[in-house]
Image: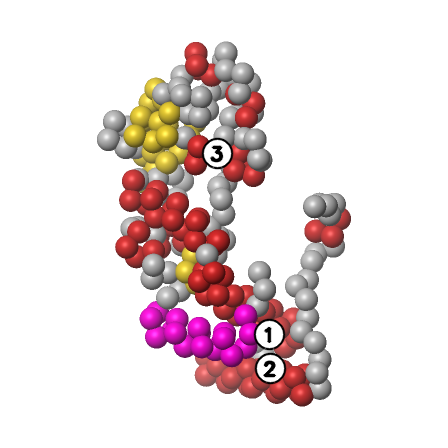
């Protein structure tokens, strides 16, 4: 994702601050608590991954979006038309309400497409749903990153992350040199002022912006052609 121009970032920042719209990514642990309904979804800038299962990352696999959900009858149909055998509401390890749905093993065993559905050699496919309102809001949140408005809003987070990275790497902001909140606050204010001075000098001297860094391990990944 490319960073928005500085004047646009300032304008969007003022707009978001006035409307109190938090910007969260898929790594935020509290993101699931921010989408209790689709009505509130428009007030939050959220970035969600397509899904946690391997099926969402392989082109020929059957991810959750390809299953038909009948909320009134509490039945889920797989892409091959087989209906689920159990639907039971519960909670996950974080006490979030979820609905585990299981399919019949007799339908799974003879299915020729089971390798696109699950890697288990014995157990049939099991999908986990969120309650209806949260499920609908989550699907909308996953569709929004493709919109231009979302890209403009979320570009602000890239600028914020870059500022934090500069403060940590260049100014050692994680290490407090003094004892007490008042002195710590003063250190942060002085560090922020020093960062502004460095940025102004770099801008005047025409120093180009740094590119997004890659870890040594990430650089070992093969480059996909096409």
10 Å neighbourhood of mark 3: few (<14), some, or many (≥20)? many
* Residue carrying label 3: 63
* Residue 56 percent coordinates (x, y): 52, 38
Q: Which residue is drawn at 37% across and 60% down?
A: 44
Which stretch did the figure color magenta?
A: 4-20
Of the pair 36 and 10, the residue shown nearer to us? 10
Q: Which of marks 3 and 1 is in front?
A: 3
Q: Are marks 2 and 1 in contact (CB under 8 Å)?
A: yes
* Residue carrying label 1: 167
* Residue carrying label 2: 195
Q: Earlier in the sequence, mark 2 or mark 3?
A: 3
Q: How far apart are marks 3 and 1 (CA)?
A: 40 Å
* Residue 63 percent coordinates (x, y): 48, 34
* Residue 59 percent coordinates (x, y): 57, 35
Q: How far apart are marks 2 and 3 (CA)?
A: 45 Å
Please indicate, yes or no, whether residue 103 appears anywhere in the rendered image: no
Q: Helix or strand or loop: what does disc 1 sit on?
A: helix
* Residue 110 percent coordinates (x, y): 50, 11
Question: Would you say 57 lies left or right of 63 here?
Answer: right
Question: Would you say 179 lies left or right of 76 here?
Answer: right
Q: Helix or strand or loop: what does disc 3 sit on?
A: loop
Q: Which residue is drawn at 63% across and 77% down?
A: 171
Q: Distance between the residues labelled 2 and 1?
A: 7 Å
Please indicate, yes or no, whether residue 71 appears anywhere in the rendered image: yes
10 Å neighbourhood of mark 2: few (<14), some, or many (≥20)? some
Q: Which of marks 3 and 1 is nearer the N terminus?
A: 3
Please say if 147 is above or below 155. Answer: above
Of the pair 12 and 177, the residue shown nearer to us? 12
């Amino acid at each position: 994702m490319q960073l928005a121009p500085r004047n646009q970032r300032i304008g969007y920042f003022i707009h978001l601050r006035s409307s109190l719209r938090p910007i969260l990514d898929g790594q935020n642990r509290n993101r699931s608590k921010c989408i209790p309904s689709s009505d509130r979804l428009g007030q939050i800038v959220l970035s969600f991954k397509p899904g946690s299962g391997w099926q969402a990352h392989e082109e020929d696999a059957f991810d959750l979006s390809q299953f038909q959900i009948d909320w009134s009858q509490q039945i889920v149909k797989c892409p091959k038309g087989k209906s689920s055998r159990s639907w039971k509401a519960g909670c996950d390890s974080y006490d979030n309400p979820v609905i585990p749905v299981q399919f019949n093993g007799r339908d799974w065993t003879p299915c020729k497409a089971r390798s696109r559905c699950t890697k288990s050699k014995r157990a049939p496919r099991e999908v986990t749903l969120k309650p209806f309102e949260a499920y609908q809001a989550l699907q909308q949140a996953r569709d929004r990153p493709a919109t231009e408005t979302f890209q403009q809003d979320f570009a602000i987070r890239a600028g914020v992350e870059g500022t934090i990275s500069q403060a940590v790497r260049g100014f050692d902001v994680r290490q407090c040199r003094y004892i007490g909140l008042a002195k710590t606050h003063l250190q942060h204010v002085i560090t922020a002022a020093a960062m502004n001075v460095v940025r102004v000098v770099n801008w005047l001297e025409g120093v180009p912006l740094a590119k997004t860094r890659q870890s040594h391990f990430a650089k070992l990944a093969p480059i996909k052609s096409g």
